[in-house]
């Protein structure tokens, strides 16, 4: 493990016991202590580069104060443009930011865009209440507009900073609810925390073991290309396995840090979604014990990531809180109507958010191709099969889904366009060829289906004419 990864691991481990201590604090003390601890960690790991995140926060606050109506679009433009500057600072003679500064910048970009949307919704609902004299039915609405201190406290809350890039995204409303918990000590903590951590040693051990046998740098060597095709193909399966084990262990640990603090704890009846929080207003029965969950800060569903059938579903279970952010703030505003094109737009934005490396774009923009392929095959092939045939189709679909993610992972970890293309060419772009072939087969069979319907319709008309003649 690299020194940076060891620091990540140390911060991650420290966040869990610290979280339990925060349950003893009153709301004002909790807010101040969480801010102070977050700032200390930011400055210790980022140094002078902490100013980048501060500029992002202050710029968003200024946008909200000047024009809350247009704040969502303006904040998105501001934070994404600052991301571009942040990644090109060396062009302006400024020092290269640390990986920790990059991680904080990524999370703050999500937070600031979400905050602008929440504040716009707050003002719109307030205006509606004044005009209709009725209480707003909005479930996730804010009770008041956050002050500058509130915004800075949310931005640098230790829960998001201590686990930096690994931390689940959470909205300001989730943060505010955490501060105002009436009796944090009564909320579940130890048991769900241990439940989330129980598989972490397994994931960590598998990561270390498989990574030692299949190191990523070996892919870039000429010796790697001397191996047979099946070895080169299998290598991406191993690399994606290592990738998953690394993030499974990290995200489960990060979730445990949130759970120990009580962040994102809501009654099960609130039907919370990862990233978004409660979706319905829930009033518990006073005679019934309330059961809680931490779905709001759930960032990974390890089982469904591995065993869901479709490419589009795989995205739902991976980095779930960020997927929620993309679904609510990016996908609806895509300049396209077709699902595959809207998904492509969303993946393009996601790639930009991750970085400027060409490998991100090659990987993320392969997803719409795979989605189009699986949609074509489902409509033209699976729909014509019986239950047994559909079961076989789903198993083949699952196998190809995993290989598609194996292939896309290579671009994500190799980063450079040349390295990614070299690897994909070493396996003859097999995944891309299969995807294009599936789209072609789907189109051909779709055309055949139309001809069948047309011929059947013409035949029915002939029968009607014949019956009338008789």
Image (cartoon, helix red, strand yellow):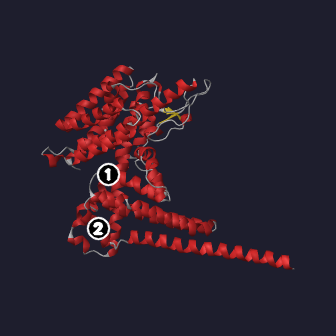
Q: Residue at x 15, y 49 (%)?
A: 91
Question: 277 or 256, which is in the foreground?
Answer: 277
Q: Secondary structure at mark 1?
A: helix
Q: Secondary structure at mark 2?
A: helix
Question: 450 or 54, which is in the foreground?
Answer: 450
**In the rendered structure, which disc, 1 or 2, sits on the residue that comes first in sequence?**
1
- CA neighbours of label 1 inside 10 A, class few (<14), some (14 to 19), many (20+): some
Question: 243 or 196, which is in the foreground?
Answer: 243
The residue mark sitting in front, 1 or 2, is 1
- The residue at which mark 1 appears reads as 352
Q: Residue furthest right?
A: 470
Q: Residue 232: x, y in percent?
A: 31, 70
Is 235 placed above or below 469 here? above
Q: CA distance from mark 1 to mark 2?
A: 19 Å
Q: Residue 41: x, y in percent?
A: 24, 33
Answer yes or no: do the residues labelled 1 and 2 have beta carbons within 8 Å?
Answer: no
Which mark, by number, is residue 421?
2
Q: Residue 25: x, y in percent?
A: 37, 21
Query: Would residue 204 be found to the left or right of residue 193 on screen?
Result: left
Query: Would residue 60 be found to the left or right of residue 170 on screen?
Result: left
Q: Residue furthest left?
A: 93
Q: How many marks?
A: 2
Q: Residue at x 44, y 69 (%)?
A: 435
Which mark, by number, is residue 259?
none
Residue 395 showing in the rendered view = no
Is 66 placed above or below 96 here? above
Q: Residue 370: x, y in percent?
A: 44, 63
- CA neighbours of label 2 inside 10 A, class few (<14), some (14 to 19), many (20+): some
Quadrant location of the C terminus in the rendered image: bottom right
Residue 184 showing in the rendered view = yes
Is 38 placed above or below 401 here? above
């Amino acid at each position: 493990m690299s020194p940076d990864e060891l620091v990540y691991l140390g911060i991650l481990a420290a966040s869990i016991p610290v979280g339990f201590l925060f349950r003893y604090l009153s709301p004002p003390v909790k807010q101040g202590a969480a801010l102070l601890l977050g700032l200390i960690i930011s400055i210790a790991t980022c140094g002078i580069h902490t100013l980048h995140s501060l500029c992002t926060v202050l710029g968003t606050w200024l946008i909200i104060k000047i024009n809350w109506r247009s704040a969502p679009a303006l904040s998105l433009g501001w934070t994404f443009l600052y991301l571009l500057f942040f990644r090109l600072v060396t062009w302006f003679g400024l020092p290269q930011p640390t990986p920790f500064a990059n991680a904080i910048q990524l999370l703050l970009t999500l937070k600031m865009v979400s905050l602008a949307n929440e504040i716009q919704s707050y003002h719109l609902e307030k205006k509606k209440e004044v005009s209709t004299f009725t209480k707003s039915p909005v479930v996730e609405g804010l009770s008041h507009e956050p002050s500058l201190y509130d915004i800075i406290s949310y931005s640098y809350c230790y829960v998001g900073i201590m686990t930096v890039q690994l931390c689940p995204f959470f909205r300001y409303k989730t943060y505010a609810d955490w501060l105002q918990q009436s009796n944090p000590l009564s909320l579940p903590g130890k048991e769900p925390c241990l439940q989330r951590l129980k598989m972490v040693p397994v994931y960590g051990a598998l990561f270390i073991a498989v990574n030692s046998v299949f190191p990523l740098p070996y892919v870039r060597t000429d010796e790697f290309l001397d191996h047979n095709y099946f070895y080169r193909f299998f290598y991406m399966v191993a690399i994606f396995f290592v990738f998953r084990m690394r993030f499974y262990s990290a995200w489960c640990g990060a979730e445990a840090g949130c759970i120990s603090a009580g962040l994102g704890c809501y009654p099960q009846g609130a039907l919370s979604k990862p990233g978004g929080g409660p979706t319905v207003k829930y009033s518990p029965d006073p005679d019934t014990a309330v059961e809680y969950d931490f779905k709001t800060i759930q960032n990974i569903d390890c089982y469904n990531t591995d065993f869901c059938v479709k490419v589009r579903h795989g995205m739902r279970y991976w980095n779930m809180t960020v997927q929620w952010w993309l679904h609510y703030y990016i996908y609806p505003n895509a300049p396209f109507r077709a699902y595959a094109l809207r998904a492509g737009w969303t993946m393009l934005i996601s790639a930009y958010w991750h970085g400027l490396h060409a490998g991100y774009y090659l990987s993320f923009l392969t997803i719409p191709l795979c989605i189009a392929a699986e949609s074509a095959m489902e409509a033209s092939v699976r729909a014509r099969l019986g239950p047994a045939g559909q079961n076989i189709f789903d198993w083949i679909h699952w196998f190809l889904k995993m290989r598609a993610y194996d292939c896309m992972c290579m671009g994500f970890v190799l980063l450079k366009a040349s390295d990614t293309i070299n690897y994909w060419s070493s396996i003859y772009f097999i995944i891309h060829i299969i995807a294009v072939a599936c789209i072609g087969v789907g189109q051909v069979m779709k055309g055949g289906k139309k001809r069948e319907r047309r011929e059947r319709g013409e035949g029915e008309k002939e029968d009607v004419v014949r019956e009338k003649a008789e």
